[in-house]
């Protein structure tokens, strides 16, 4: 079992939903997907590298024959997979504090969802419906979501300065270099070992 | 398309695990045992195959009962969940896995119902099997959705090198600064990007409970 690799935590959650409620949730996701400003809180939280919700209708669990027994379920299921930076408690706290309306819109269709505020019953619910990761891989375990965004900003500025360096005088270059440092200085935070937890 | 966000693909696969009462240990335990032996570093199978940003494998034993008044129900199979955040086109990605790490794929998915008899060596059959187990992602979020794995690793390499260069060139005169920057940029461009999975801390403890 390994929910953590470097600076990312793998969260897996599954919750049951009455089938008729699934369509409301699908509509909510459709709107969220197409009205980008609604994703601003999710983006601004800035510690989620990747996240997804997957609705599995009760008759849509993969069935391959070969002796597999078909599922006979009353509920549809909502799967949530998140790859986030920080600890479980920080993540759930931030979700509850910043995204409470959005989370309620997504999970209120799941059975027994208590609401994302107050945070204590919300945490109890997530802990109840979470299951652990057996194997977790990341190509860049030392980097957070903010490190990734910063690295691309630095790379873009660096490429521009590299081009300019070859065609400028030392004085012109020194001025451009100073501007470059001003542009990237907030994006040079050191990556490295994650804090020990657990 | 909900499976895709920019150039990133959110692959979700649920493969039913063989339920054989004569198997000892059971197939789900054999998968867990195999996964527990796998490296999560640069010698990870997913580092050796192209295109994986982050991926997880999870044995899902059952659905979770949340209490009255909801109904208690159970799955008839256990499922192996594969959640991958990968570059681009699905066929290319799955084909890349089959080409690069067929033994590992067989070691893991060989315990699942309907896995091709020839294993991942039969590339087309493997791709067909994985697609048969695929679920459509309903909503997919990616913080950075337009960079490949090599581009991301290169950017992280440049970020670190630039920080070091700036720190070591404070107060340098313009001519020296320009000359050394040009050398530095050429050197950095020529350097290969670090291998995937390689830059993390070497840790002996990689566990993490529910809510630490």
Image (spheres, coloured by chain):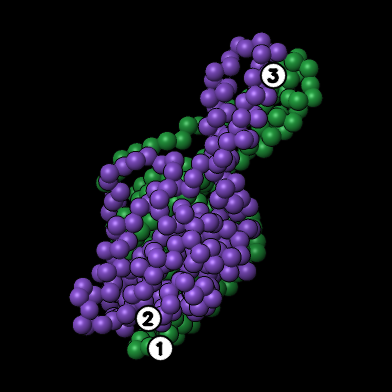
Chain colours: A green, B purple
- Chain letter for mark 3: B
- Chain letter for mark 2: B
Q: Describe the element under mark 2 as helix, strand or loop.
A: loop
The 10 Å Cα crowd at callout 1, few under 14, some 14 to 19, many 20 or more, is: few
- Write the residue at 44% across / 62% down: B101
Q: Describe the element under mark 3 as helix, strand or loop.
A: helix
Q: Is residue A186 left or right of residue A179?
A: left
| Relative vertical location of residue B166 with respect to residue A105 in this rendering, above or below | above
| Relative vertical location of residue B21 with respect to residue B191 in this rendering, above or below | below
Q: Describe the element under mark 1 as helix, strand or loop.
A: loop
- The foreground one among B130 and B121 is B121
- Write the residue at 58% across / 15% down: B170
User: What residue does disc 2 label?
Assistant: B113
Query: Along the polypeptide, which appears first: circle 2 or circle 3?
Result: 2
* Residue B207 x %, y %: 28, 51
- Write the residue at 29% across / 57% down: B37
Q: CA distance from mark 2 to mark 3?
A: 62 Å
User: What residue does disc 3 label?
Assistant: B178
Q: CA distance from mark 1 to mark 2?
A: 8 Å
Q: Are marks 2 and 3 in contact (CB under 8 Å)?
A: no
Quadrant assignment for the N terminus of chain A: bottom left
Q: Is residue B145 left or right of residue B33?
A: right
- The numbered disc on residue A65 is 1
């Amino acid at each position: 079992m390994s929910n953590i690799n470097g600076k990312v935590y793998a969260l897996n959650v599954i919750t049951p939903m009455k089938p008729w409620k699934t369509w409301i949730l699908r509509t909510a996701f459709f709107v969220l997907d197409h009205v980008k400003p609604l994703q601003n809180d999710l983006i601004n939280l800035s510690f989620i590298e990747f996240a997804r919700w997957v609705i599995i209708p009760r008759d849509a669990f993969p069935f391959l024959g070969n002796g597999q027994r078909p599922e006979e379920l009353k509920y549809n299921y909502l799967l949530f997979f998140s790859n986030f930076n920080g600890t479980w408690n920080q993540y759930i706290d931030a979700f509850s504090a910043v995204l409470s309306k959005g989370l309620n819109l997504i999970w209120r269709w799941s059975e027994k969802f208590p609401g994302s505020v107050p945070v204590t019953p919300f945490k109890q619910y997530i802990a109840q419906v979470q299951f652990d990761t057996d194997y977790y891989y990341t190509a860049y375990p030392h980097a957070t979501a903010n490190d990734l965004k910063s690295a691309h900003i630095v790379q873009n500025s660096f490429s521009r300065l590299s081009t300019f360096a070859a065609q400028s005088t030392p004085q012109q270059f020194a001025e451009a270099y100073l501007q470059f440092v001003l542009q990237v200085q907030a994006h040079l935070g050191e990556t490295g070992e994650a804090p020990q937890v657990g | 398309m909900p499976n895709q966000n920019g150039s990133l693909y959110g692959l979700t696969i649920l493969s039913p695990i063989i339920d054989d009462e004569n198997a000892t240990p059971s197939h789900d335990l054999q998968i867990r045992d195999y996964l527990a032996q796998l490296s999560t570093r640069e010698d990870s199978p997913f580092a050796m195959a192209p295109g994986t940003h982050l991926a997880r494998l999870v044995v899902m034993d059952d659905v979770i009962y949340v209490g009255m008044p909801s109904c208690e129900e159970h799955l008839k199979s256990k499922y192996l969940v594969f959640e991958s955040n990968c570059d681009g086109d699905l066929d290319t990605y799955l084909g890349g896995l089959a080409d690069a790490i067929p033994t590992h794929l067989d070691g893991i998915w060989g315990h699942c119902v309907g896995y091709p008899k020839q294993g991942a060596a039969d590339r087309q059959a493997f791709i067909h099997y994985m697609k048969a187990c695929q679920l459509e992602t309903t909503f997919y979020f990616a913080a950075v959705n337009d960079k490949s794995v090599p581009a991301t690793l290169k950017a992280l390499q440049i970020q670190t090198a630039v920080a070091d260069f700036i720190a070591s060139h404070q107060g340098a005169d313009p001519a020296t600064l320009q000359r050394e920057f040009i050398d530095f940029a050429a050197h950095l461009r020529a350097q290969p990007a670090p291998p995937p999975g390689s830059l993390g801390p070497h840790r002996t403890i990689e566990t993490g409970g529910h809510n630490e």
